[in-house]
Amino acid sequence: MSSGNGWIRVGTTTDIAPGESRAVRISEGRSVALFNVNGRIHATDNQCPHMGFPLTRGVVKDGILTCDWHGRSFDLEGGGCFNYECDDLETYPVDIRGDELWVQAGDATYKRRDQHLQLLWEGLLSGDSWTISKATALLLSGGVSEHDIVQLILRHLGRHVASERDAGGGGDVVSLLVSGLEVGKRFDGEDRLMALSLAGRAASGRASERLEVITLPPPVRWDQIDDWVRMFSRNMQDFRIERCLHTACENGHQDHIFKLLFECAVAPYFLGFSRNVASLGDLARVVDTFGWGEASELVCNLGAKMTGRGRDEPERFHRDAVRLLTELAPELESHDYEGNTRTEYDENALVDALLSVDIERSFEAVTRALRDGVAIERLITTFVLLAADRMARTPVNVDAGWGPLSTEFNLAASLRHVHAYGGPAAAAKGLYHAAWQIFDNRWINIPARSLDEPLPAHRTDTPDAAAASDLIVHSIKSLDIHGVGDQVVGYLNSGFDGSDLLKEVGRAILWDDTNMELLPTLRVAFNEWEGSGGGAGGGDASGGGAGGKGHPSRYQLLVGLVRYATDVRLNKNSMASINTAMRFSEGRTTVEVFDE
């Protein structure tokens, strides 16, 4: 019974004996906990703000309510929590009308945006996945925009990377953040929450104070900054690069920064530092989405760490490759790339050279293609499809090499970012970095195959696309690495939609404990299959753009991803925590969720 102004009749004074408690449901998914303490009735939300346990199962002593599950304790009067990573408890006024108990529980309007953003911040600092998931679910349920949530994650990430991460670790974190956000856009509900939570978990960790970066005193021109950054990059002086980049931001030169960073990242002495290129592409995507105001600390610090990172003396083959690219650099920088428009070329000859285990022959083949006017986007597609084909066919009886192979795949696709942000000369140099990566992975014993060789023509035996997709997902979950690749080819040969399959495979990846490992490759597979390339270049029938639409090896984009997901799967999932977080945001106690 309700009397207006949020007052609800919840029973009588005789319903709760002194020292006892009782839960009363007041709406769907919402219950009030009543406590009789020395004859006085107190009312609180029955859901513990930590993990949703019913507080009526807790203990009250000296005015403090302690949850019986994890020991979180609260002031019974005001609801304040005495622990970290736990929201304050909502308490409600109580009125006794005769022998009737009335509680003013108010409406369900969301009023705790700031508290839940603080809760998310605490979860990010500690790296506690439950707190991150819970806070994210509460914020989304309360109507807080995903953009605002990610802004907080990004601000934390900037300081976390600046104070706690080196170039490699920081780049990996940014890749996971961007991958989680881009993959999450393709899903709804709990699947999207999982992707967002993964992005938050990737960005989490300590964020210490550090010395403030000071702008260089004027006058400082952009051409000076450009020269200094290139010199400091050669000399491995990242701290000096950061001050230059910070000064460039303060002086309004943001539009020039990524071109400079990409040109440094593809310099010959950075051969073998493949993640530099991909991470810079991810940083550029962050700025595109959130602007320099939110991302400047992250870009200046991590960009400096990557382009000024230390380098050991290279071994013989590596030294030869650096020398070859150094000799080619003047030609690549002066080449007129407007004439590189060809999409038809001898792709098999390039692939044969790339797989020849002869770095000089490999580099010569790339040079010949550029001199012959082959479009850079077309060459990038060749590298992407070659990497996918190698993932689709790598033997798995000993060491499939998934880490190095996925690096090949992600590096090749990231060259589209180099082209878009750094220009054609930087992208051309990036092709040699991708060629080196293939050479460096020569220990993976994958038989050579021409990319125009037709794949098997069999079709699936299942009656429809949904059944065929279910069969593939079942094979992933049952670790059928030897059968799942043929199932994917059969699915696609039957004319079923590859984007639908990707979404189902993506869902299986998100809910497995190997999701962090696979997330960047899942993102690249989505972008390449859909022809977006992550924001640069579209596909066409000649295979000239992202995804190689119409290319005989295009199916290998999905085959390689699915085999990778199957072989590394732990056959576990993280569904319980995300499902519980969703139910928690709806106001239900953990016991109610478990009872379901």
Image (cartoon, rainbow, N blue to C red):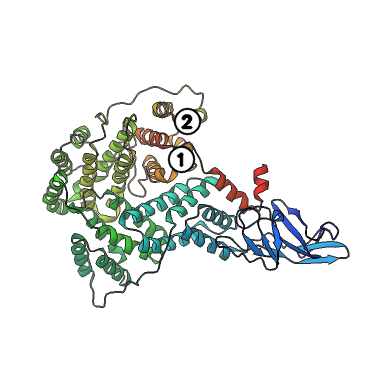
| Helix, strand or loop status at disc 2 | loop
Q: Kindly identify which numbered label has been placed on residue 558.
A: none
**Residue 68 coordinates in the image, percent (x, y):** 66, 54
Which quarter shows the C terminus? top right
Label 1 neighbour load within 10 Å: few <14, some 14-19, many 20+: many
Name of the residue lying farthest toward the right: 98
Name of the residue lying farthest toward the front: 61
Image point (30%, 72%), residue name: 251
**Residue 292 coordinates in the image, percent (x, y):** 37, 64
Indicate the amino acid at tag 2: Ser
Marks 1 and 2, how far apart at CA: 13 Å
**Front-lying residue, 393 or 531:** 393
447 to the left or right of 490: left
Label 2 neighbour load within 10 Å: few <14, some 14-19, many 20+: some
**Residue at image mark 1:** 509
**Residue 106 coordinates in the image, percent (x, y):** 72, 63
Indicate the amino acid at tag 1: Ile
Image point (31%, 57%), residue name: 167
In primary-sequence order, the first of circles 1 and 2 is 2
Residue 189 seen by the camera: no
Residue 157 seen by the camera: yes
**Front-lying residue, 275 or 315:** 315
**Residue 222 coordinates in the image, percent (x, y):** 23, 69
Image point (38%, 46%), residue name: 520
261 to the left or right of 45: left
**Residue at image mark 2:** 478
Q: Nearer the viewer, mark 1 or mark 2?
A: 2
Name of the residue lying farthest toward the left: 327
